[in-house]
Amino acid sequence: MFDLILTNGQIVDGTGKKKYVADIGIKKGKISAIGDLKNVQKSKVIECKNYIVSPGFIDLHSHSDLQILNHKIEKLLQGVTTEVVGNCGFSCFPISSEKYQMTRDFSSPIFGDFKSKWNWEDAKSYFKELKKNSLVLNVASLVGHGTLRISVMGFSDKSPSREQLREMKKKLEKEIADGAVGFSSGLMYSPGSFSNKDELIELNRLLKGKNKFYASHMRSYSFQVVESIKETIEVGMAANVPVQISHLQCVGQDNWNKLDTVLDLVSKASDEGLDISIDAYPFLAGSTVMTQLLPQWMLEGGIKKMLDRINNYRLRDKAEQETEELLDVRWNDLFISSVASQKNKKLVGMNLSEISKIKNIKPVKVVFDLLSEEKGKVMIISFNQPEENLIKVLSYPSTMIITDGLYVKGFPHPRLYSTYPIFIGKYIKELKIMTLEEGIMKLTSLPARRLGIKDIGTIEVGKRADLTIFDYKTYNSKATYTRPKIKPVGIKSVIISGNVVVNNGKFTGKLLGEVLKN
């Protein structure tokens, strides 16, 4: 007797093997049997004829670090059963009490609104809070290099002293021991941008042989993307740790032709023995903080010092000139997605060229005025790449599909709500860039292997019963950049630990997620 049987489903098991029709028996949260179970005594059945039954999707690159405490269900409604937070150098720990406000200023634009105080000094206290709060899906966390660096050095643009490096290593070692699944960097963001290769190698050496990995938001995805790929590979090889290149793309028309070189470098590193893979979201545009447009010296010392420099006309003139020189896309490719105040809310959804015409000032001055008025809290959507390049990245054998979703006021990027239905509905079903079996592998077993968590990612006897059931014919999304919050269609059920948490596309209210460690 089973707790639940899924009958007649078209099983795509996550391994890349061709789909097949079978029943799945679930008992005590695990897959207990796969085959013909029609004559088995049973208590509950879900008829899955004409539906795909897949392992639950794994979002390897999420920024839901705080929003999971608010029981957000956007990922769950797409079929995600596990997400990984702590990406791009941002994590909820470790936080030193004296640098609390500095850390909050650093992370808030990425993490979204969260009214309660959050000051977890380590992974252990963060995980404890997650368990106490209950979760809508499973969560694993990386340690963010930016957060770690702030806890020891603040927003210093200097290399760490021996003592400071020793303190960072001590903290990182503790977080890894307490269950963090790896280490992430955000080298385009201050203070991660102030670190050098030697610092990153030294910290990453602590991961060696511990079933952990290094995920990097690299220094550049545009003019210096080739150099940035080389640096990331060098760090991985020197530290002898697995490497994950976050949201790979070549940004800006002048750099689109570099993608083949970049992918060749990844392939060459893999051939030479580095465990290296990449991830990507199935959209032409990305989303980030507007401060990323600024030269890095403007961000030394944190948001308050940045605002002081903006209000210093001599420094501002210099910074505006450098911002224009550094720009890798056109001004009309950059859209305001979120602001903090009501005053500028009318600008949300407009691009910087449009705003500059309305205000009768140069686009770069719009950037600096907005950052000043909004105290640095401005989010943008940036159209970065052509469809041809995106398809190459999505199709690359080791690519995993991620949301990189950000919870912001205004217009969140639609990837938060529709990454997986867009990937399957558009790129697999309509454009046929790969088979469904290959695509599901990118959502399940590949990220499970990267995480080093063995009981998720494939449909096998003994594995966790984390499953997604969807109608391949209808699974898709109508979400757009101006109407991002549209729920996907085609999801029948999402199951976590053998329990139905989404039924006919609706959340059942069950909070059964767990903190996963490797």
Image (cartoon, rainbow, N blue to C red):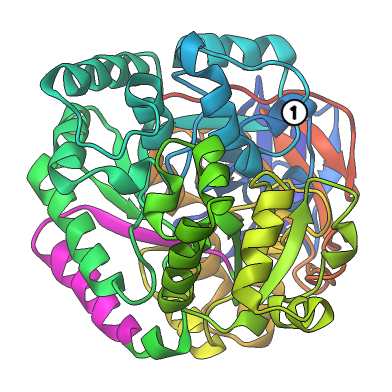
Q: Is residue 343 left or right of residue 75?
A: right
Q: Is residue 282 left or right of residue 492?
A: left
Q: Give the SS element for disc 1.
A: loop
Which residue is rendered at x = 37% and y = 85% of the image?
A: 255
Q: Residue at x 17, y 30 (%)?
A: 209
Q: Quadrant of the C terminus?
A: top left
- As for residue 264 lying within the magenta part, the answer is yes
Coordinates of residue 402 in the picture (x, y in percent): 55, 56
- Compare residues 73 and 46 and report the one nearer the observer: 73
Image quadrant assignment for residue 234:
bottom left
* Magenta part of the chain: 258-281
The three-letter code of the residue at mark 1 reads: Phe
Examine the image and state in which quarter residue 159 appears. top left
Q: Is residue 464 visible?
A: no
Quadrant location of residue 1? top right
Q: Is residue 100 visible?
A: yes
Q: Where 477 sits versus 241, above or below?
A: below
Residue 66 magenta-drawn?
no
Q: At x 73% / y 65%, what residue is drawn?
A: 336
The answer to whether 175 is drawn above or below residue 373 in the figure is: above
In the image, residue 79 lies at what x, y percent? 71, 50
Residue under label 1: 114
Q: Position of residue 426 (x, y in %)?
A: 69, 79
